[in-house]
Amino acid sequence: MKRNEFQLRVNFGDTDTAGIVYYPNYFKWFDIAGHQFFRSIGLPPLKLMKEQNIILPLLHADCTFERPLYYDDIITIKTVVEEIKQKTIKLRHEVFRGETRTGYGFEVRGWVKESEGRIFAVPIPDDVRELLEEEGMGECAQTNPWLHA
Amino acid sequence: MKRNEFQLRVNFGDTDTAGIVYYPNYFKWFDIAGHQFFRSIGLPPLKLMKEQNIILPLLHADCTFERPLYYDDIITIKTVVEEIKQKTIKLRHEVFRGETRTGYGFEVRGWVKESEGRIFAVPIPDDVRELLEEEGMGECAQTNPWLHA
Amino acid sequence: MKRNEFQLRVNFGDTDTAGIVYYPNYFKWFDIAGHQFFRSIGLPPLKLMKEQNIILPLLHADCTFERPLYYDDIITIKTVVEEIKQKTIKLRHEVFRGETRTGYGFEVRGWVKESEGRIFAVPIPDDVRELLEEEGMGECAQTNPWLHA
Amino acid sequence: MKRNEFQLRVNFGDTDTAGIVYYPNYFKWFDIAGHQFFRSIGLPPLKLMKEQNIILPLLHADCTFERPLYYDDIITIKTVVEEIKQKTIKLRHEVFRGETRTGYGFEVRGWVKESEGRIFAVPIPDDVRELLEEEGMGECAQTNPWLHA
């Protein structure tokens, strides 16, 4: 299955009153990693929205927290397709500081069409399915994803 | 000039690595207080958007930070119209913990119309101007603003 | 088991580029609801930290998203103890707009002691367990939790 | 005066109900750019905290918003020292999408020592002042700042 990874730094405002990363930030990172994953396989979510009225709303998300993260930590988020159903895609995201995994979780996203103000799930096209099922990294496999158009 | 106030609690994730409120949160509170102010005078931003295609984008914002705020602090945000120009409204927001002011600042918002995908500032209508210039609290002057429709 | 509920409003910045609530905000609300729950049973997290060096870090969180939420929606978050183990507490949170549930999920928090710069899970005291197992709403059962000290 | 710059991407959750960047995010970016600036001149805020008990709290921040920013925009934040007083540093931050400036603002930060639970402003050391006054980019002048240790 396709995968991708990138790195970012824990910011000063990302921690909570206990001095460790405020847990909802994991889900922000998962969301960013998910969008970056779709960019990396040539399916930028913005293009899907503009050209095909396809959006990828969350149906389910979860995270298991294993180790605390702190300000200034540099983390790597490793994303891989976990499962493809008829109208949904499940991504697994793992967060590492160096060699240590600090948490991991899953996002289940629908393949959803907007039409005349309504939204409804539609089958994932075969060419998209093939892209997702390929082995290897996406085209922006570099660890700095920020500047990949 | 019209004014409004409400209270909220500093949440666990609102602080930074130094254990005090992360300063961009002041601007979130200003934004929330600004929206609440417009609700309190019978001009909910959502209604302005839907019925008149009017949005109130920020042109300028600033804040002076006077005292640290901590997790669990209950704060009161006092909002008042500072100045009305032809196409802009300036609000002053002051943040208090009990009797102590911890910071204050200003938001300058445009009165902006969306039409056919373009946006442009338009003159503030006279009836809106009169509402803004009245003395006293808006109709949801209670300190819990959350549930005021 | 003990339960609690409160209401809040979806803010202008809580939505995403698709115009619906950005999903990590559900986890912010769960975190706020979790803290509010502990306040409601007389165990404010700040007091636990200061008086007993007890913190309640997340071990796991998940959310199932059922309906979109929009700017200005007023939501009720209903929290109940789902399960108590020796060193962990599982809370269930459900989010409603009026009678419609828009999403629900779980937080598993550890009962963790900080001592000499280290943290380790410790057994939940019997009196805390009894409090959690009681039927009924906590003492701040009102839907506006913000100002409950 | 010293300067620095870096780039980032506008995320899916960074926009508001009007579809443009939610303005408090400008201040998040200023905060991140400020921290990155200090890293770039060899004074990482984390090191200042741990080794010298020096923190750099905000005294004032402001921003002028010139153009809307949208999801997926890649922006460059250009930071430069604007003014150094005895106990404060003023940074100017400008945000660009390509050649177009979309907003700019200032942060005034104190040079503040923590000692025995109290904090108080102290004079900026001469060697720090010299570093700040030098012309040119800091050592991590590259536009991807995320991975600079």
Image (cartoon, coloured by chain):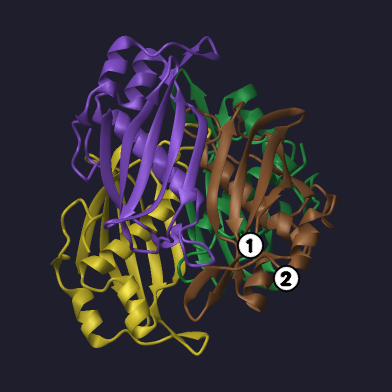
Chain colours: A green, B purple, C yellow, D brown
Side of B41 relative to C64 (left or right):
left
Q: Is residue A149 above or below residue D31?
A: above
The secondary structure type at the circle numbered 2 is loop
Q: Position of residue D31 (x, y in %)?
A: 61, 52
Front residue of this view, candidates D72 and C145: C145
Near mark 2 (Cα within 10 A), the count class, few <14, some 14-19 or many ≥20, is: few
Residue beneath the point at 65% across and 69% down: D46
The numbered mark at residue C97 is none
The secondary structure type at the circle numbered 1 is strand
Front residue of this view, candidates B77 and C127: B77
Observer able to see residue C18: yes
Q: Is residue C124 above or below residue D103?
A: below
Residue beneath the point at 72% across and 52% down: A3
Residue beneath the point at 47% across and 78% down: D117
- Do the residues indicated by labels 1 and 2 lie within the same chain of the protein? yes
- Residue on which the image places disc 2: A98
Q: Position of residue B35 (x, y in %)?
A: 35, 33
The Cα–Cα distance between marks 1 and 2, rounded to whole angstroms, is 12 Å
Instruction: Name which quarter of the figure residue A89 lies in.
Output: top right
Q: Position of residue D48 (x, y in %)?
A: 67, 71
